[in-house]
Amino acid sequence: MDNPYEIIDKRLERIELLLENLVFQTKKKNIKKNNTTKTKMPTEDEMDAYILKTVFSEKKS
């Protein structure tokens, strides 16, 4: 019978391979986000621009 640590190590290696395969398949399929919501979420660039605009347009008292 194998050492319990070796069994665990083999299982972890299989899990790692499965995860790598899953990530690769996901990237390969290039899954698109579902944009069916009524309100459009701002992009990261739009959020950055909004934050900069509000920070630099504040009036100093």
Image (cartoon, rainbow, N blue to C red):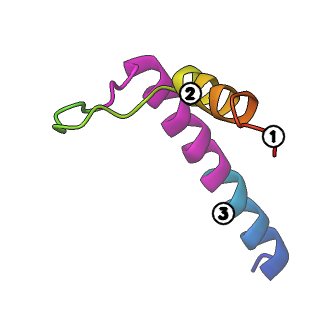
Res 15 quadrant in image = bottom right
User: Which residue is identified by label 1?
Assistant: 60
**Element under disc 2:** helix
Q: Amino acid at mark 1?
A: Lys
Q: Which residues are magenta?
A: 15-33
> Which residue is depicted at the point 24% across and 30% down?
35
Q: Is residue 56 left or right of residue 53?
A: right
Q: Position of residue 21 (x, y in %)?
A: 54, 35
Number of residues whose C-alpha sits closer than 10 Å to that of mark 3, classed few (under 14), some (14–19) or many (20 or more) = few
**Element under disc 3:** helix
Position of residue 53 relative to residue 6, above or below, is above
User: Which residue is identified by label 2?
Assistant: 44
Marks 2 and 1, how far apart at CA: 27 Å
Q: Amino acid at mark 3?
A: Arg
Number of residues whose C-alpha sits closer than 10 Å to that of mark 2, classed few (under 14), some (14–19) or many (20 or more) = few
Front position among marks 2 and 3 = 2
Q: Is residue 4 left or right of residue 37?
A: right
Marks 2 and 3, how far apart at CA: 39 Å
Position of residue 21 relative to residue 32, above or below, is below
* Along the line of sight, the residue nearer the viewer: 38 or 58: 58
Q: Amino acid at mark 2?
A: Glu
User: Which residue is identified by label 3?
Assistant: 11
Front position among marks 2 and 1 = 1
Please tell me which of labels 3 and 1 falls first in the chain: 3
> Which residue is depicted at the point 48% across and 25% down?
43
Number of residues whose C-alpha sits closer than 10 Å to that of mark 1, classed few (under 14), some (14–19) or many (20 or more) = few
Marks 3 and 1, how far apart at CA: 61 Å
* Along the line of sight, the residue nearer the viewer: 40 or 24: 40
**Element under disc 1:** loop
* Along the line of sight, the residue nearer the viewer: 61 or 33: 61
